[in-house]
Amino acid sequence: MPTQIEEQQVRDFLKRAEVKTMKKDLRALREADALKERDRIIQLKTLEEQLEAQKLQREKEKAQNEAEKIARYQVLEKNAEQERIAEKDLKNYGTEEERQQIFLLESERFDLENQIDLIDKKRDPDLKLEKNNLLIKLQDWQTKLNTILEEEQKLENEEKFLAEKEQTSTIPAEKKGLETSRWDIEKKIQEVEKKRWEVEKQIENIKTKITQIDKSLDELVNEKNQLRNKILGIDKSLREIYSAIIAREEERRRGELEEQRAQREKADKIKLERNENIRRQQWTGVPIKKAQNERQALIEKLTKSAQIEKEEREKFLRNVEILSATGSKPKNEIKNEIEINEKDSIIKKAKELEQKNQNVSIPPPPHK
């Protein structure tokens, strides 16, 4: 029958064997965890490479889109500059009311364009810069969270292993040691969980800020589209005004061309008549200078005759007044005689003038 000392030695031996077995199992568990971690890192590396390739592709596409956008913007800017030069020239042909309308519309368009520039050069870049900084912080916090999760996972695996060992152990001392170790691990897990909660809170706050920035960026896009629609409306109004100016100016120029054509036709007609008169004078042999001198002499003679007639009439009227005052003849009879004499004199003068005009007129050219 074994003694008490032998039984104690057997228990100590079994305890040492159990401890060795537990250490061996823990070492095997850690090795298994290490292998899993290595596989996970390899897989993560592969995923990171894929993500990096996708990121490079997105950056390449983004750069290409930006280049196309810049090229389109340059073309639009060039066309807009040419349109503004043309508009500046057209304004000079508008009425005062049209120029005032153009000034108001262009001022409004200038203000809207400044608002778009402020969005493109200040507000949008500031929001994107803030978002990039938050994404960098988010990546840092995510790395910390991954480290904490790995540590927590290891502790949970170790706790699970100790709990299983504790349930299968039949030795009170070993069971108590396993329980103590498990409690220590649970405390560590609680501390790790507190760290994880803090990190997750930071990550959640950063994600909330990023969501708000994305919302603000969308609002900026909508605001910019509304401003562009207003600019399109202003451009439409300006085009209507400029179209009216162009139509009116074209009509005016057509009128000027027609007037110039009519003047040219009139000048050609006068020139043709003058040439025809010169040819007739050459055919009849009457010098032009002589005909002009005769006409001038006739005009002077008629003027002198009219002056003499006027003086005689005034003299005659004075005599009539004198006779009427002395009572030689009635005044009505004297006036009738004056009117008869004037009519006869006028008829006589007209016949003489007609006869002289016939003598001076140029006969038509002879027929061949």
Image (cartoon, grey):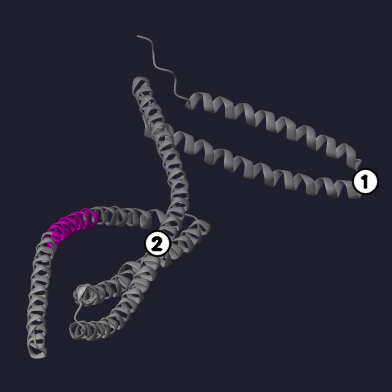
**Disc 1 secondary structure class:** loop
- Residue nearer the viewer, 245 or 257: 245
**Disc 2 secondary structure class:** helix
Q: Magenta part of the protein: which range?
A: 47-70
Looking at the magenta stretch, what is its main secondary structure?
A: helix
Q: Is residue 267 magenta?
A: no
- Residue 267 in view, yes or no: yes
Residue 272 lies, with reference to residue 2, above or below; the image says above
Residue designated by label 2: 224
Whole-angstrom CA distance, mark 1 to mark 2, is 110 Å
Specify the quadrant that holds the N terminus: bottom left
Q: Residue at x 78, y 46 (%)?
A: 317
Residue 265 lies, with reference to residue 238, above or below; the image says above
Q: Is residue 49 magenta?
A: yes
- Residue 92 in view, yes or no: no
Q: Quadrant of residue 264?
A: top left
Closer to the camera: disc 1 or disc 2? 2
Q: Residue furthest front?
A: 1
Q: Residue at x 8, y 84 (%)?
A: 2
Counting from the top left corner in percent of width and height, residue 184 is at 23, 86
Q: Residues within 10 Å of mark 1 (few under 14, many from 20)?
A: few
Residue designated by label 1: 327
Identified by mark 2, the residue type is Lys
User: In the image, 99: left or right of 155?
Assistant: right
- Residue nearer the viewer, 169 or 178: 169
Counting from the top left corner in percent of width and height, residue 336 is at 84, 35
